């Protein structure tokens, strides 16, 4: 079967994919693409992840303002040492039950 780019694509059923997942993934890592069918109808495509394509998509999202570049956090320990508020006397569940009892 040809895909929209004109390349040959292998076809596999969901059942076959589940039974031979490791073998299919090995082929995908080598560049193969699979059209996954359920009862003869196409439901998904299994394609290799192209790291460069992912990087380009991420950069495009950042350029468009739809995402922010990751910020380097030098110290996880600083984050873990942030002062946390003291535990309150009432639990959220207790407050919810009281609210429901009062019919608020």
Image (cartoon, helix red, strand yellow):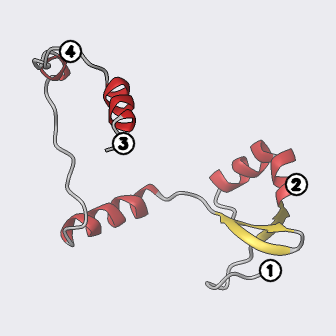
Mark 1 in CB contact with mark 3 (< 8 angstroms): no
Between tags 1 and 2, which lies in front? 2
Q: Residues within 10 Å of mark 2 (few under 14, many from 20)?
A: few
- Please report the residue visible at 13 percent of the width from the left and 19 percent of the height from the top: 85
- Report which residue position mark 2 lands on: 15
Tell whether 75 sits left or right of 92: left
Between tags 4 and 2, which lies in front? 4
Instruction: List x then y, in percent, for residue 12.
Output: 83, 63
- Report which residue position mark 1 lands on: 1
Q: Secondary structure at mark 2?
A: helix
Q: Earlier in the sequence, mark 4 or mark 2?
A: 2
- Report which residue position mark 3 lands on: 103
Between tags 1 and 3, which lies in front? 3
User: Is 73 or 3 nearer to us in this picture?
Assistant: 73
Q: Earlier in the sequence, mark 3 or mark 4?
A: 4
- Give the answer, above or below, for where 74 lies relative to 19: above
Measure the C-alpha gap from mark 1 to mark 2. Answer: 19 Å
- Report which residue position mark 4 lands on: 87
- Please identify the quadrant where the C terminus is shown: top left
Q: Secondary structure at mark 4?
A: loop
Q: Secondary structure at mark 3?
A: loop
Q: Earlier in the sequence, mark 1 or mark 4?
A: 1
């Amino acid at each position: 079967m040809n895909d929209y780019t004109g390349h040959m694509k292998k076809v596999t059923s969901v059942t076959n994919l589940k039974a031979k997942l490791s073998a299919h993934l090995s082929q995908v890592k080598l560049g193969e693409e699979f059209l996954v069918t359920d009862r003869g109808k196409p439901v998904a495509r299994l394609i290799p992840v192209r790291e460069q394509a992912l990087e380009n998509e991420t950069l495009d999202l950042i350029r468009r303002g739809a995402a922010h570049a990751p910020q380097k956090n030098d110290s996880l320990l600083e984050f873990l040492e942030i002062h946390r508020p003291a535990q309150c006397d009432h639990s959220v569940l207790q407050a919810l039950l009281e609210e429901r009892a009062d019919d608020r």
